[in-house]
Structure formats: C-alpha cells, structure tokens
Image (cartoon, rainbow, N blue to C red):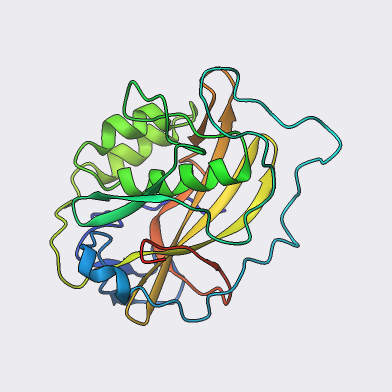
Amino acid sequence: MSNDGTATNTPFNRWWIVSTLFVVAVAVAIVLVLALGRGGQNDAAQPGAEPSDTSGASQPSTTSAPPTSGGACDVNTANQDIPTAGPPAEWVPERYFFYPTSTEYGPVDSDGPWGCFAHSPTGALFAAANAVTWAASEDFAAVVKANAVDNGGGEQFIARTQNANRDQPAGRVAQIAGFTFKAVEPQAVSVQMIFVQGDVEASSTVNLVWEQTRSTWLVDYATSTVLPQQYSGARYTPWSAGE
C-alpha cells in the first residue's frame, strides 16, 4: 500500500490533483471537491457500481467468538459480516460534505474529536468514512492526533497537509459513492472509499488497526492513502447520502 506523498492540497479542496505524486505517468487535474451541498447528492452517479468483490479479502474467523467492544461503547459487535451493500446510516453535513454516522456502528460515546466504532468490518467502514471526512476539516490536526496509530504517520500527515487550503465552497462537488474492502482481519481492516463527481471517480484507502484499550479503530496514516487518487477499479459497493 502506498503512502500519501507531499501535497499542497487536501482531498477536499476545489481541485483534486491526480499527478505523478499519486498515479505514475498520469498528469491530469481532476475537478473534485469533497464539500458537497445537499443539491449535489443526486450528482453522485455510480458508473460501474457493483457489490464489492471480497473473494480476495481475508475473512474474520467464524469459529471464534466475535470481538467485543471492551465495554466502553454501546455498539453492535454481533454482526461480523463484510458488508455487501451500503449499511443504513444517518448522513450528517460537515459544511457541504455529507458523511455517514450510526448509533449502531459509530461514532458513539465521544468525549473528543474521535469516537468509538464497532469492532467489526461495518464499524471499520464507518471509521474509514469519518477519517477521510475529518482529514479535511479545519480542526483536522486534532482529529488526526486522536485517531492515528502511534507510529509517527499521523504527525507526518499533519506536517504535509497543515498549510493546505481547506476551503469547501459549494458548486462542482463530489460525494461518497461507495466502498471496497481491500483486506479484513479481526484486528486490521483496509477500506477503499470511492468518491464521484459527474463522470469522474477518485478513491482514498484507509488502513485501520483495532485499539482494544480505547475500543475503537485507529488510522494507520503511514500506510494509508488518505489523499485521493484517480480510481481505476471496475467494481465497488454503492453507498451514498442520496440512497
């Protein structure tokens, strides 16, 4: 998995730049802003959107007891299935961008910038969607410090993007359109979030590690690609605020 390269823009700026920093031999600028107004929800067409192919993803063991939340969060840990359809969610606006939340899967019980998410593939999906959302917020540094795996990746991500323009004007905008599970293990999950504006698609890959003490998923920024890349995959599971 590739790391985020040095960038002057976050994935939520007016211009999503797809260049050799992200895709070798591709030097194109994609007009995408993950700062959607409600009017842009129906613009998130899903060309090629199909259920994710999880045949290559590692499956959680079905013989062991489901992981628990450690008693810190009131979330659903019974469902350990990999989602093959977009789970029900309450889509909440962050400026013009809509992101998913759930009282069942998270975030819940938050006394800070990062709440608890269920110890399950579905909980990891909600964590991944929230991670890309708050990485573009004005208070992104506080969120990254709260949700980063303690391996230096969060500090590096903050240093690379702290001077980026985080304006989120309405207009030509993008929205979460779906997801793909890249790998699933009981203690680690990799989720690719897909974004669409018009006929242009981009993606971010969020690698998550379960933190038992805090009973939540943390982001491994050292191996994640939070800044969007041009999406070249053919299939993903549709999931959007307009559904």
Identity of the residue drawn at 55% across and 43% down: 124
Where residue 178 sits in the image (x, y, percent)? 48, 64
Q: Is residue 45 above or below residue 102?
A: below
Residue at 65% in and 25% down = 68
- Residue 172, by quadrant, is bottom left
Judge whether 41 appears above or below 79 on screen: below
Residue 66: x %, y % from top left: 73, 32
* Residue 131, x across and y down, in percent: 40, 43
Q: Considering only vertical position in the picture, is 120 above or below 83?
A: above
Q: Judge from the rendering whether residue 122 lies leftward or rightward of residue 218; answer left or right.
A: right
Between 143 and 2, the one lying in front of the other is 143
Q: Is residue 102 left or right of residue 142?
A: right
Q: Position of residue 141 (x, y in %)?
A: 27, 34
In this orientation, does residue 42 appear?
A: yes
- Which quadrant of the structure image shows residue 212? top right
Quadrant of the rendering where the C terminus is positioned: bottom left
Does 182 sit left or right of 18 as displayed? right
Q: Is residue 13 above or below residue 24?
A: above
Q: Is residue 167 left or right of residue 147?
A: left
Identify which residue is drawn at 47% across, 71% down: 231
